[in-house]
Amino acid sequence: MIAGALLSVGLWTPVSGCMVAAAALWGFITQSGDPWGNILLATIGAALSMIGPGVWSLDSRLFGWRRILIRDK
């Protein structure tokens, strides 16, 4: 729940995304039944940890928002 709360306010996005993905993978391994909810949650957590915070997150307010620029050669 703590990792989900951190993701919802946008604080420590890479760390909390990894925590959400790890918790979802742990739930996938240990629980029986339908695994698709845990697979979806792990995918979203991993994607958010790789993409990083958005414009309106606390991370962008505290540390600055980073923009990926693709330059032509």
Image (cartoon, helix red, strand yellow):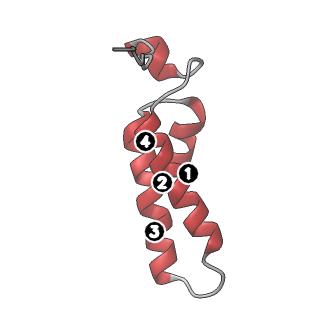
Q: Mark 3 touching mark 4, by CB under 8 A?
A: no
Residue shown at 48% from the left, 54% from the top: 20
Looking at the image, residue 42 lies above or below residue 54:
below
Q: Residue at x 41, y 19 (%)?
A: 70
Is residue 2 in sight in this rendering?
A: no
Q: Out of 4 and 13, give the one closest to the viewer.
A: 13
Residue 58: horizontal and vertical position, in percent?
51, 21
Secondary element at tag 3:
helix
Sequence-earlier tag: 4 or 2: 2
Note whether 73 is above or below 1 in the view shown. above
The answer to which of marks 3 and 2 sits earlier in the sequence is 2
Give the labeled residue for mark 3.
25
Kindly indicate whether the residue at mark 2 contacts the one at mark 3 (C-beta within 8 angstroms): no
Cα separation, mark 3 vs mark 4, equals 15 Å
Which of the 4 image quadrants contains residue 29? bottom left
| Percent position of residue 69, x then y | 42, 16
What's the distance in space between the residues labelled 1 and 2, CA to CA? 9 Å
Please name the amino acid that badge 4 sits on.
Answer: Ser
Q: Amino acid at mark 1?
A: Ile
Crowd tier of the residue under label 4, counting other residues whose Cα lies within 10 Å: few below 14, some 14–19, many 20 or above = many
Task: Tell whether label 2 touches label 4 (CB within 8 Å).
Answer: no
The structure residue drawn at horizontal position 60% and vertical position 61%, both measured from the top left corner, is: 40
Label 3 CA crowd tier, 10 Å (few <14, some 14–19, many 20+): some
Q: CA distance from mark 4 to mark 2?
A: 9 Å
- The residue indicated by pointer 1 is 44
- Asked if the residues shown at circle 1 and circle 4 are in contact, with their CB atoms under 8 angstroms apart, the answer is no
- Mark 1 or 2: in front is 1
Residue in view at x 64 percent, y 86 percent: 33
User: How many numbered markers are drawn?
Assistant: 4
As drawn, the residue found furthest toward the front would be 73
Question: Could you give the CA–CA distance between mark 1 and mark 3, rounded to whole angstroms?
Answer: 12 Å
- Give the numbered dot on residue 20: 2
